[in-house]
């Protein structure tokens, strides 16, 4: 046989072997013989998806302490409020040291308190200044979001919030895009005392007009000067303008406030908050701002007489289609057009459900109710969702003491374990931890959540949404996280989980049974066939090259 046909035969064999090798080339993982689900695993491009359950950034903030004469209760949770914020919220920026004020992001005129008009030892003229902050909005400087605020691992919906007037940068520091802690959801809970003269100024630093409507709060229709005092849409506060609302509430109770411009959209974007009027008592310095809601670390005099602790529970929901509008444009004209004329609220959905500005598992950081045996705990609950909340507390039954700021007589106070709360409605609850089989079943890590099924999801993923825990203190670790939950925490403090890129039970002994249906182990026979074909092809290529080289020398 001549050399030329032999060479051609070898080239044909090499080509065939390459084709066989390509055909049998194995993937790291391969599809099973079933159609994989739409959410089949696809590794995120991010290098780090798993977070520490608790950053433990300021463990010293958890301690009970006194700052500028303000007694601040212990807060065992993972992310306690800045105690310096609380000191300013109680005494006003004008009544604390500059050293205390400098430990906050509050402006010097964010909150001022003066004039003990009734001579009972506390100030009665309260001046509050609020701004509108945008979180997770589009940046004009590049394709990224600015003033970022995660409601859950990797989830950053666009939000607007009222915020106390702040000083310095909106960002946490010069090297960060993260919003400073004062700028967060929900809008702050505001507390004043019954009979106080309260002046609330909206300094509109935003690009759209807004108002503040004091829902349920005793107020006149016009101010002393005859200007708007009801915060309705026909009297908007335009960008760069300010307006002061004047109240002297005669009735104590848990109320509400929200923007009343393009109400459906602005309300659902987050411009709403709880407004609490405390009973008038001597020497009653109330905590005017409760940033992020949750534990009230300086309860009022009246609350301290009847309760050992006090918490604000604020429920919100977000339509991701609405929230996305401010992330796809930063021209106010485009945003106004898309939000007012293209977006249709009647065709909207609630995708994200939050408690105190976060969805599970972040609710474990700052929305846990920490209890001991034989306590009476006061809960203020408000529903800022578009849908009903059916609040259920495992292992306990609580008593409704007030509806919409109206105290109920003893005969009308109802004890139950599910509380239906309509949109914009508020309840005051008395939660007892006496282990008697009715008020409490005993110590534990008892979940509490919205019993409407969507409420415990985050864009359809569960566990998520507004789940939180009523935790008895001995069952929390030193960082305020629940014990006996390590496996769950490892699973859900993961951006891939809520991006739907990992199986719900993708780890552990049951992963082969309950993990990814679309992925199985490699076919080792295929790997051997690939190796043989590729090896023979490479060997023949080398042989042909050597023969050709020898022929050239001859």
Image (cartoon, grey):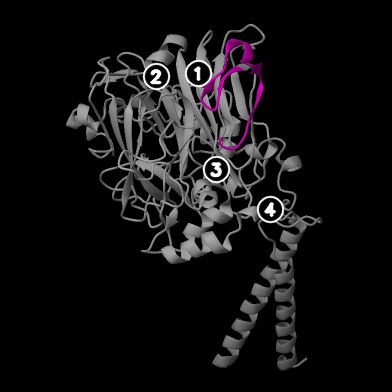
Q: Disc 3 or 1, which lies upstream in sequence?
A: 1
Q: CA distance from mark 3 to mark 2?
A: 35 Å
Tell me, yes or no, whether the two marked residues, 4 and 3, touch with CB atoms within 8 Å: no
Which disc, if any, is residue 299? 2
Q: Disc 2 or 1, which lies upstream in sequence?
A: 2
Left or right of 266 in this view: 34:
right
**Residue located at (58% from left, 8% from top):** 434
The number of callouts visible is 4
Above or below for 19 versus 256: below
Q: Is residue 86 magenta?
A: no
Q: Disc 4 or 1, which lies upstream in sequence?
A: 4
Above or below for 526 versus 300: below
Which disc, if any, is residue 39? 4
Residue 183 in view (yes/no): no
Left or right of 7 in this view: 110:
left
Tell me, yes or no, whether the two marked residues, 2 and 1, touch with CB atoms within 8 Å: yes
Nearest to viewer (mark 4 / mark 1): 1
The crowd level at tag 1 (other Cα within 10 Å; few <14, some 14-19, many 20+) is many
- Identify residue for label 1: 378
Q: Position of residue 278 (x, y in %)?
A: 41, 22
Q: Disc 4 or 2, which lies upstream in sequence?
A: 4
Please report the bounds of the magenta region as a residue range: 399-424
**Residue located at (42% from left, 31% from top):** 79
């Amino acid at each position: 046989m001549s050399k030329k046909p032999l060479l051609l035969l070898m080239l044909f064999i090499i080509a065939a072997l390459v084709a066989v090798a390509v055909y049998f080339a194995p993937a790291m993982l391969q599809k099973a013989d079933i159609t994989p689900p739409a959410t089949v695993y696809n590794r995120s491009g991010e290098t780090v998806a798993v977070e520490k359950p608790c950053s433990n950034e300021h463990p010293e903030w958890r301690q009970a302490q006194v700052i500028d004469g303000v007694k601040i209760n212990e807060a065992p949770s993972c992310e306690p409020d800045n105690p310096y914020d609380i000191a300013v919220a109680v005494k006003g920026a004008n009544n604390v040291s500059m050293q205390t004020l400098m430990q906050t992001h509050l402006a010097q005129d964010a909150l001022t308190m003066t004039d003990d008009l009734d001579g009972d030892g506390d100030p009665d003229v309260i001046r509050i200044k609020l701004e509108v902050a945008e979180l997770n909005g589009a940046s004009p400087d590049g394709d990224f979001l600015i003033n970022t605020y995660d409601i859950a691992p990797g989830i950053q919906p666009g939000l607007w919030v009222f915020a106390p007037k702040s000083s310095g940068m909106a960002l946490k520091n010069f090297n960060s895009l993260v919003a400073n802690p004062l700028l967060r959801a929900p809008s702050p809970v505001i507390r004043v005392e019954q009979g106080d003269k309260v002046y609330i100024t909206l300094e509109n630093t935003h690009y759209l007009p807004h108002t503040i409507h004091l829902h349920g709060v005793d107020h006149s229709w016009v101010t002393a000067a005859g200007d708007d005092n009801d915060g309705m849409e026909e009297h908007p506060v335009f960008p760069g303008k300010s307006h002061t609302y004047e109240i002297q509430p005669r009735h104590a109770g848990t109320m509400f406030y929200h923007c009343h411009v393009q109400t459906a959209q602005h309300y659902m974007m987050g411009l709403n908050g709880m407004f609490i009027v405390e009973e008038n008592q001597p020497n009653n310095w109330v905590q005017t701002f409760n940033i992020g809601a949750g534990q009230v670390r300086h309860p009022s005099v009246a609350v301290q007489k009847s309760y050992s602790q006090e918490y604000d529970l604020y429920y919100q929901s977000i339509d991701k289609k609405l929230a996305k509008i401010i992330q796809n444009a930063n021209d106010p004209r485009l945003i106004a057009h898309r939000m007012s004329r293209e977006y249709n609220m009647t065709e909207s959905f609630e995708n994200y459900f939050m408690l105190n500005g976060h969805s599970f598992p972040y609710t474990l950081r700052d929305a846990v109710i920490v209890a001991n045996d034989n306590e009476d705990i006061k809960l203020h609950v408000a529903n800022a969702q578009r849908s009903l909340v059916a609040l259920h507390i495992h292992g306990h039954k609580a008593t409704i003491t007030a509806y919409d700021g109206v105290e109920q007589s003893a005969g009308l106070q109802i004890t139950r374990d599910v509380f239906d709360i309509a949109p914009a409605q508020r309840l005051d609850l008395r939660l007892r931890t006496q282990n008697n089989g009715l008020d409490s079943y005993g110590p534990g890590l008892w979940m509490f959540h919205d019993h409407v099924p969507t409420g415990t999801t985050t864009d359809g993923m569960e566990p998520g949404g507004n789940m939180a825990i009523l935790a008895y203190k001995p069952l929390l670790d030193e960082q305020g996280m629940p014990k006996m939950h390590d496996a769950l925490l490892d699973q859900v403090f993961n951006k891939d989980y809520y991006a739907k890129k990992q199986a719900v039970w993708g780890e552990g002994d049951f992963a082969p049974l309950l993990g990814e249906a679309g992925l199985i182990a490699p076919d080792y026979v295929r790997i051997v066939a690939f190796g043989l074909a590729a090896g023979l092809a490479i060997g023949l290529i080398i042989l042909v090259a050597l023969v050709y080289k020898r022929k050239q020398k001859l």
